[in-house]
Every structure is written in C-alpha cells, then in structure tokens.
C-alpha cells in the first residue's frame, strides 16, 4: 500500500488537488465540512494508471457538491473581519491581469486564499490568489486579486462564493472586472466595455450559482436580473472616463460568459453575434447573479484584450499571453477609473 501512496493525488470536493510524489504525505487543501460529508459528498479513493509503472490514487467526489450553508460563509467572513480593522462597503473582483489595483491600497491587510477558511484557490496565471483589504483614496475596500472560474473545476456557486463572504462582511456595492474578447466589430483591442447586460449561457442550460435550496438570509428564491448593472454607477463611470479623456476607448455592451477553457470557434462566435453579444469571456456572470441576489449594487467592465476571430482562413489565434499583455498596458487607466469611481461610490453611499 505504501508504494501506492508514493504517487498520490488527493482531490477535495472542489476539485483542487495536490500530487504527492515520493512521499506519503496526504495534504487536503480543504477538508469537506461535516455538513457536506453528511450530505453524500464524502470522497473515495480511485485507482488511476500513470506513467512509469506507478499507480495514482485520486479521491473523487461522489454526487453533486452542496453549496456552503450560511454558517460556513459566516466563518470565512468572521475570519477576515478578525484580521483587519477595515470595514469595507465596496468590493472589487479583479479580472485576468487586472489585479494591480489591489497593490494600490494603503494600510492593506493581505490574505492568501489558502489561509481563508473554506476558500477555493486560484490556479490561473494572472490571478494572484489573495484577498487584499485596505484604503483606496481613504475609502475602505476589499479586492479579490484573482477569481475562480468554472473551467478550473469549481461549481458556479463556488466561483461566486466570495461575493457572499463580502456581503456578510458588510459590502453593499461591487465592481467586477474581466478580460474579454471583442465580438462587436466596432471594438478595438484595449477598449473598455462598461457592461450594461449579460447573457447567462449556463442559466440557459439549467445551471446557476443559485441552484439548490435557497436561504432567504442571502436573498429571494426568484431574484430579478433586469437592471443587474446599476444605471447610476454606469452614468457615473461615463462621466469619469470623459474627465479622463478616455471616452473614445470606452464602449457599453452585452457580455456573455462561456465555460471555457477553450476560446471560441468561428461558428460559435457568429452565433453569439446574432444574439447581440458584444464581448465574450469566461467569468463574471455567476458573481453578478450572486451579488444581485443578495442586494448589492453592481458595476462591471470588460477590458477588450483581443478581437474575436471571425474568419476561417487565418493563422491568428486567441491566447492567454496576449490577454495578460494587453491588460498590463491598460492597467494604469483601469486603476484610475476604478479609483475615481470608488471615491464617488463612497460619497453616494454616505449620502444614502
Ligand atoms: O478572469 P477573467 O474573466 O478576466 O479571465 C479571462 C477569461 C479566462 O480566464 C482568461 C482567458 O484568457 O481570461
């Protein structure tokens, strides 16, 4: 048995796993809570063939993972609150390559995701994987420097679980950012698209971060999703970009989230354009759905990091390196936009 354990992969119910080769140490990144275990999520070991004549054991999840109950989210929130004197009412989720905003915070407290009870971990390049809480121009904010995507193996509710943690910490308004491909032919690489609406593709297929038993302490069973993207915040942002002389690179449009991790085929893109999509990405929608469910005001934007490729006869391809590179070039403008918006959001919040 010990030779089997020499090459062991342990997978927690979220799918995050550690491979331990050459040792018998089993490291579960996150233990299933008792609640989850009693609801049929307990893992079992599965033998897998691997190269080099060795054997892998993988713990697999049996059945569907149950979303964390209120008390589990509360535990994460209390942990963060006990580790900082800041009491943010504004939260920010930083998209691919856009985490630099968090480094601008003063008097910041930094929590790697691994250290926060019940938190998933980031696995994508350009997502540092830390919660940063501090002051931006004197306003307390909490920034997710890295988010969770469905393609990493997380269920939608887990991708959006930090939004509920923010809610229980007192956050009332959230800024969600992402990198996206520009599908609208009028968009250029480097443009900033203020999101005015989204198409929830996963919802069409019967999946939702709100799927499962509803806890009214978070929000209603059937939340409305028109006006998901707050009109006042969008108007405020438009004034700010005009002041920054950025109006010519700012667009407004409809975002769609696909599951990824593949970029889209030409046929898929043509279909999406027909139904009114302006920008294509792999995130944001679950976070916005959960934020609206628990009554937060939402502002979101996409940085257009690449043009979607709509022709068959080209060698050009979308790639993550380009996404990170374009994000890096635009980061100063985006940080200033977010910073100015946060200051105005805080004033509006104070005035009620
Ligand atoms: O986290 P976001 O949505 O900004 O990241 C986008 C979507 C994929 O994760 C990645 C593809 O390049 O960038």
Image: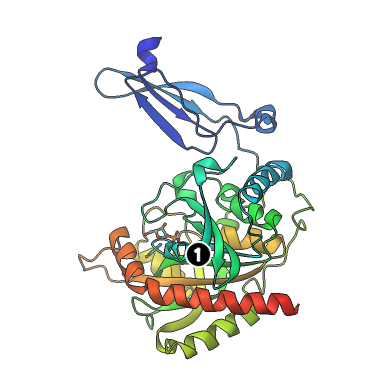
Residue drawn at 42 percent across, 90 percent down: 245
Left or right of 147? Residue 329 is: left
Quarter-wise, where is residue 332 in the image? bottom left
Left or right of 93? Residue 48 is: left
- In the rendered view, tell whether residue 209 sits above or below residue 194: above
Residue 214 visible in rendering: yes
Residue 308 visible in rendering: no
Closest to the observer, 348 or 210: 348
> Residue 67 at what x, y percent from top left?
65, 43
Residue drawn at 70 percent across, 75 percent down: 349
Left or right of 301? Residue 73 is: right
Residue drawn at 52 percent across, 58 percent down: 108
Name the outermost residue toward the top.
1
Quarter-wise, where is residue 174 in the image? bottom right
Residue, disc 1: 105
> Residue 170 at what x, y percent from top left?
70, 59
Q: Quadrant of the N terminus?
A: top left
Q: Quadrant of the C terminus?
A: bottom right
């Amino acid at each position: 048995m010990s030779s089997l354990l020499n090459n062991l992969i342990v997978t927690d119910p979220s799918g995050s796993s550690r491979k331990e080769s050459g040792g018998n140490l089993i490291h579960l990144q996150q233990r299933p809570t008792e609640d989850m275990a009693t609801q049929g999520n307990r893992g079992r070991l599965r033998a897998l063939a691997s190269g080099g004549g060795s054997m892998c054991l993988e713990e697999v999840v049996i059945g569907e993972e149950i979303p964390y109950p209120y008390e589990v989210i509360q535990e994460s929130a209390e942990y963060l609150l006990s580790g900082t004197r800041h009491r943010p009412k504004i939260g920010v989720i930083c998209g691919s390559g856009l985490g630099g905003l968090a480094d601008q915070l003063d008097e910041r407290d930094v929590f790697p995701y691994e250290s926060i009870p019940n938190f998933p971990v980031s696995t994508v390049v350009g997502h540092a994987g830390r919660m940063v809480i501090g002051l931006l121009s004197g306003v307390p904010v909490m920034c997710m420097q890295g988010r969770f995507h469905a393609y990493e193996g997380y269920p939608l509710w887990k991708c959006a679980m930090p939004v509920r943690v923010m809610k229980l910490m007192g956050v009332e308004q959230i800024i969600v950012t992402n990198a996206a491909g520009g599908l609208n032919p009028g968009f250029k690489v480097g443009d900033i698209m203020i999101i005015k609406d989204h198409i929830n593709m996963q919802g069409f297929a019967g999946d939702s971060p709100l799927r499962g038993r509803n806890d009214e302490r978070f929000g209603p069973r059937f939340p409305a999703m028109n006006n998901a993207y707050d009109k006042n915040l969008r108007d405020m942002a438009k004034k700010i970009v005009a002041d920054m002389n950025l109006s010519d690179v700012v667009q407004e449009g409809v975002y769609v989230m696909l599951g990824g991790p593949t970029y889209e085929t030409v046929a898929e893109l043509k279909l999406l354009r027909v139904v009114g999509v302006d920008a294509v990405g792999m995130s944001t929608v679950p976070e916005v759905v959960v934020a609206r469910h628990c009554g937060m005001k939402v502002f979101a934007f996409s940085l257009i990091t690449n043009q979607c490729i709509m022709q068959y006869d080209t060698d050009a391809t979308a790639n993550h390196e380009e996404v990170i590179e374009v994000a890096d070039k635009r980061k100063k403008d985006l940080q200033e936009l977010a910073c100015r918006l946060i200051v105005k959001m805080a004033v509006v919040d104070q005035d009620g």
